[in-house]
Image (tube, grey):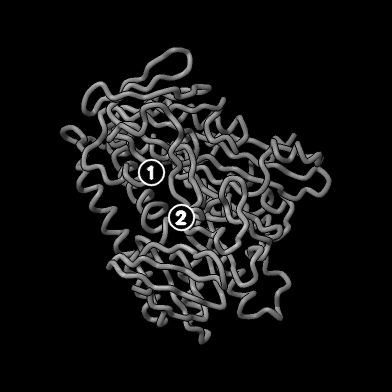
Amino acid sequence: MTATILKFDAVVVGSGQAGNPLAVELAKAGMRVAVVEREHVGGTCVNEGCTPTKTMIASGRVAYLARRAADYGVHLSGDITIDMRKVRQRKRDIVSSFRGGSESSLAAAGVTVFMGEASFTAGGPPTLRVKLLAGDERLLQSNFWFINTGARPAVPTLDGLDSLPQVLTSTSIMELDVVPEHLIVLGGGYIGVEFAQLMRRLGARVTLVQRGKQLLPNEDADVADVVAEILREDGIDVMLDTSALSVTSPAPLAIDLRVSGDRTISGSHLLVATGRTPNADVLNVRAAGVECSPQGFVKVNAYCETNIHGIWALGDVTGPPAFTHTSYDDYRIVAHNVLKPDLLLGKSREGRLVPYTVFMDPQLGHVGMHEHEARKSGKPILVASMKMSRVARALEVDETRGLMKAVVDAETDKILGFTCLGIEGGEVMNVVQTAIMGGLPYTALQNAIWAHPTLGEALNNLWADLH
């Protein structure tokens, strides 16, 4: 049976944080637009990433504060218990609400949505074969193609891993209905750190295994050291410079992980948090002539254009940094350049300032250059660092773990980079990001009148020890 051929002005493959708003805007501009989605409208952020993880992390923080209630003179009767089914249901409800909003926006704009598995076919003009979840197929053709298929958890090559039913990814761990007795986390990046702390706060014993010499490899070593101190203070066993060699399951809900140094870690569950793999291979983009990197990411220029005219790629499928906000910025770049090509200047990825926040507790917010990056660049720099224990507001709420750190151009006094590992670190970082965007010198923050007592007023004092 021959699949039905349907023609559209634009086809968006993947309904993530770039694909959905792009489809809506193109449709509102008068185009006939289709979106193809394999599983859930809304993409990783809404369904498996930001929204569900931060919702569950909020539950973990409440548990943490409840256990510390006596520190504030508040005494709770009885033990603190965790209803994991309730934690999971709260997460599901919020995800469902956000996803529903995405579905409604597509419908209101008149976008046609195909739910199914898509792949490009070889030969002739670009054509997309969609195997619908209902069972039949469609062939889509278009003048404009937009790839927003994101990435999936990467599973490392580890002897014995394939045979273990209790191996978790960043997606499946959020569907547990019980707290693991002893969770082993493989990987000390952003995902591994967030889930290690979350599950510890929910009551699991946690061991975090990191192959490198520090957690969060992109951060400065002094910041990463404080991150490790915080996790250890929370009761997490952090193992650095430790490589996983093999894994076995001697019994149900039992895992033995053999690591370097001829050691064995025994636990009940294993979370694999060793990175993410782009979904370009699932889409078979090479059949359309689209070039990919050796790691499988779609190659694009500063305007998100691939090597094939009429095909763009946006978001995580194009490679790091893989953040929702960079994906959304890709949408703004592409929408502008497709709909207003005469105003191309200034709408590109070139030189964009990308902040991020790691939602451990306290948060780690960062924007701009790290110290190690600035030193490699050869710039003459000044560095300031201040512990959060010197911040009045942090002392008042008894959340003093962490530090602030800034890198300054020694010749211009402009801020090159800023890190806040502390309570509401992402929000404090946003203030400094605004100063960087405005080209302000650090003295503008140092001499500003900040409301007291707030976290922001620490920006008066941070610069005192620039060296």
Determine if residue 342 is in view.
Answer: yes
- Residue 360 in which image quadrant: top left
Outermost right residue: 411
Determine if residue 453 is in view.
Answer: no
- Amino acid bearing label 2: Val
| Residue in the picture at 50% in, 76% down | 141
Q: Viewer-nearest of labels 2 and 1?
A: 2
Residue 445: x percent and y percent? Answer: 67, 51
Residue 310: x percent and y percent? Answer: 61, 72
Residue 212: x percent and y percent? Answer: 55, 27
In the figure, 356 relative to 310: above or below?
above
- The residue tagged 2 is 282
**Residue situated in front as seen by the camera: 318 or 222:** 318
- Amino acid bearing label 1: Ser
- Local packing at callout 1 (Cα closer than 10 Å; few below 14, some 14-19, many 20+) is many
**Residue situated in front as seen by the camera: 208 or 368:** 208
- Residue 343 in which image quadrant: bottom right
344 relative position to 245: left or right = right
Residue 306: x percent and y percent? Answer: 63, 63
Element class at badge 1: loop
- Mark 2 or mark 1, which has the lower sequence index? 1
Query: Which part of the image, by quadrant, shows the C terminus?
Result: top right
Q: What is the spatial separation of the Cα atoms under label 2 and label 1, in whole angstroms?
A: 20 Å
In the figure, 88 relative to 103: above or below?
above
Mark sitting on residue 170:
1
In the figure, 373 relative to 355: above or below?
above
